[in-house]
């Protein structure tokens, strides 16, 4: 096993929250060569969101007995190989090797990559992603944002994400957001908007925010209110569909009305075994899984795209961050609003630290 640390610089600084800015992202690629098969995985916890740090996962990964995991999986596949071929991914619990979600996810991707090649499984198909409309942090004017939205629709996008709100919501910012949403809808024909509120609003803000807006063109509002305790009230009394992201832990114990989507961030949640059980639970409640990135490298984005293709191939996922870096670890085959899956990962280099 070889660990290849990398540092990728963002084209523009990324604001995780208003005062939490990132200029670059550190991670490492795990590379394993066994029986003439080379497999890769990206491990890159996101500062401010993941509880574990880069150093945590790097040091723990160096202690992992990779050959023991191969032995365990080979034994597992003696009775599960047919199931694995149908699923295309390992339904194997990595919890006994690590408790760190980003490393569990990386190991799941690594061994899935190896055994797909070993069993000669074909990967094919397009994975759709939603467009990302630039928000106020890019200093784009509203007219520029509307032009960008119109171009997205012409390029085939059916859905686009718009971040709204701020930590200092005022009557002026509410009216500005309302006006921008109206302009985008007027400048496009059928584009569905996904409004990402990032928990920036209070219940009393929404009459102003949504005044005069065609709600049929709003696909959902992601994390609409600042207080988790207000979610039940909001979802019970709104005509909008809701997506849950940061409050995903509440979904275990509370049944919310009108939740149409949950945002699945594998780097925060763990391996395929964990994700599958979460998604099956949501699916029984009619809730769609929308896969999203935590600014992984292009390798990480590609492996999340594979997961998205297995779990929810008809959905538009949040995989639009693959081109936010100045550098690239892997060339992705991207056309219009889709990533096309290919057979093997091929790393570019040398761009490692």
Image (cartoon, rainbow, N blue to C red):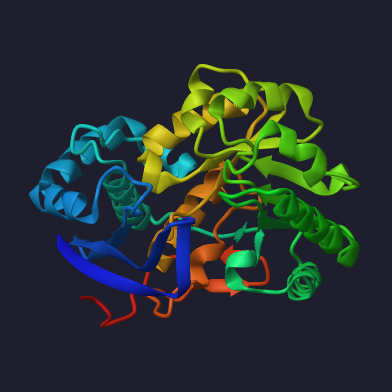
Give percent across and percent down for residue 350. 26, 83
Q: Position of residue 76 (x, y in %)?
A: 26, 33
Left or right relative to 127: residue 57: left
Q: Position of residue 246 (x, y in %)?
A: 50, 38
Q: How many marks?
A: 0
Report whether 240 appears left or right of 50: right
Instruction: Let me know if residue 87 appears in the view.
Output: yes
> Can I make out residue 89 in this image?
no
Where 287 falls versus 56 (above or below)? above
At x 24% / y 39%, what residue is drawn? Answer: 73
* Residue at 15%, 64% in the rendered image: 2
Q: Position of residue 53 (x, y in %)?
A: 24, 51
134 relative position to 155: left or right: left
What residue appears at the point 26 percent right and 37 percent down from the top-left corner?
Answer: 94
Is 2 placed left or right of 94 in the picture? Answer: left
Quarter of the image for residue 333 reads: bottom right
Give the residue drawn at x 49%, y 71%. 324
> In this orientation, which residue lies closer to the viewer: 215 or 98?
215
Give the quadrant of the N terminus. Answer: bottom left
- Residue farthest to the bottom? 350
> Split into 4 quadrants, where in the image is the C terminus?
bottom left
Viewer-nearest residue: 314 or 63? 63
């Amino acid at each position: 096993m070889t660990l290849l640390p990398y540092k990728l610089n963002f084209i523009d600084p990324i604001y995780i929250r208003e005062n939490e800015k990132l200029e670059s992202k550190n991670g490492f690629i795990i590379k394993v060569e066994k029986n003439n098969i080379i497999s890769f995985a990206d491990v890159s916890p996101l500062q401010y969101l993941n509880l574990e740090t880069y150093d945590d996962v790097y040091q723990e990964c160096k202690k992992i007995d990779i050959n023991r995991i191969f032995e365990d999986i080979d034994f597992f596949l003696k009775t599960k190989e047919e199931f694995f071929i149908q699923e295309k991914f390992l339904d194997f619990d990595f919890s006994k090797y690590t408790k760190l979600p980003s490393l569990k996810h990386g190991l799941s991707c690594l061994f899935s990559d190896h055994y797909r090649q070993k069993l000669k499984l074909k990967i094919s198909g397009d994975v759709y992603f939603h467009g990302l409309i630039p928000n106020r942090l890019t200093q784009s004017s509203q007219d520029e944002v509307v032009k960008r939205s119109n171009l997205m629709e012409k390029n085939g996008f059916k859905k686009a994400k718009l971040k709204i709100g701020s930590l200092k919501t005022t009557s002026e910012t509410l009216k500005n957001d309302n006006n921008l949403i109206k302009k985008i809808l007027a400048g496009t024909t059928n584009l569905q908007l996904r409004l990402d509120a990032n928990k920036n609003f209070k219940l009393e803000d929404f009459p102003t925010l949504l005044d005069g807006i065609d709600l049929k063109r709003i696909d959902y509002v992601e994390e609409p209110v600042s207080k988790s305790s207000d979610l039940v009230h909001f979802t019970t009394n709104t005509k909008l569909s809701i997506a849950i992201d940061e409050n995903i832990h509440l979904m275990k114990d509370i049944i919310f009305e009108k939740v149409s989507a949950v945002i699945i961030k594998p780097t925060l949640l763990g391996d395929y075994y964990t994700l599958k059980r979460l998604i099956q639970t949501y699916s029984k409640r009619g809730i769609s899984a929308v896969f999203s990135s935590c600014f992984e490298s292009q390798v990480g984005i590609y492996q999340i795209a594979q997961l998205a293709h297995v779990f929810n191939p008809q959905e538009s996922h949040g995989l639009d961050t693959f081109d936010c870096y100045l550098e690239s670890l892997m060339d992705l085959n991207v056309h219009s609003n889709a990533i096309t899956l290919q057979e093997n990962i091929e790393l570019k280099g040398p761009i490692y630290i």
